[in-house]
Amino acid sequence: MSMDETLYCPPRQPWRWVGWLLASQLLVAVLWGWLGWHWGLPAMLLSHALFLVPVFLPNSRFYGPVLSHWPQAGNRVWLTIDDGPSADTPALLALLARHQARATFFLIGQRAAAQPALVQAIIQAGHSIGNHSDSHPQAWWWAQGPKRLAAQIGQCQQRLATLSGQPPRWYRSVVGHTNPFVAAVLRRHGLTRVGWSARGYDGVARDPAAVLARIAPDLRSGAIVLLHEGGSPGQAVAVLEGVLQLLHQRGLRADIPG
Ligand SMILES: [Zn+2]
């Protein structure tokens, strides 16, 4: 077992939250019966909010384990590039090769199936791939039910396994949202959820310098850096180039676990 093997943490108790939900609603019922609706109703709303908030927190462990940094990484940093493959992929691979850097590409299943040569190029260059859903339904990812989540994650897993020769072990939530039904699907596929500790909001901002300025303070040993490809032309390459230069200046290097 390599040291990085300890990083793998597929959910072991994906339904643990059910117990908390039942207990909290029992408490609400007791409060309501005892003190009336003036206390019962706010308590109920508060209890529901407490179960909703973690859905939108990318590094929350409430609905299952998540890696939010890379422990014992030494001088290494984990670059993760979401939403590919895309027209940017060849240029990103060339840039990574020039810097002798490795990264994990979180791929969208349907895009991967449409561009199998890019998936193979990623693997052959020594990078790893992860599951980032089959069609990336970002507006409603948080509200997907168990069946749809199973199909989104399962189909992506199947496509990537066929294209790369083995099923991925890493999973990245669509826009970082994780609802109560995700963990059971991750457990079934032995997937470990990967969050992040550094991001530049490159999906929103157009200016690579602004994106880089937001990432820079968090570029340190063991950081998990969230990057995107397929946005406005040239942006992904410019941001990655800037990140690789910053890493070099700080005596850090981009590598992947496992
Ligand atoms: Zn994404």
Image: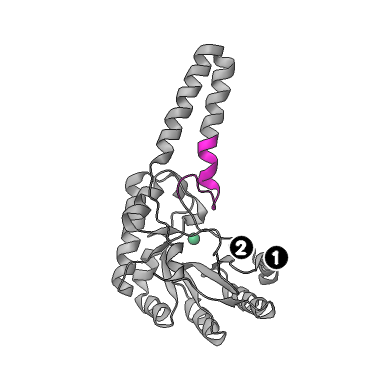
Residue stretch rendered in magenta on the structure: 50-64
Q: Is residue 114 left or right of residue 204?
A: left
Q: In terms of depth relative to the viewer, which is nearer, 164 or 202?
A: 164
Q: Quadrant of residue 5?
A: bottom left
The residue located at (31%, 70%) in the rendering is 166
Disc 1 C-beta below 8 A from ligand 1: no
59 magenta-colored: yes
Identify the residue position indicated by label 1 in the image: 217
Mark 2 vs 1, N-terminal side: 2
The answer to whether 153 is drawn above or below residue 55 in the figure is: below
Q: Is residue 191 left or right of residue 75?
A: left
The amino acid type found where label 1 is placed reads Pro
The amino acid type found where label 2 is placed reads Arg
Find numbered disc 2 in the image and state the secondary structure of the residue it sits on.
Answer: strand
Give the percent coordinates (x, y) of residue 97: 52, 85
252 magenta-colored: no
The residue located at (61%, 62%) in the rendering is 199
Screen quadrant of the N terminus: bottom left
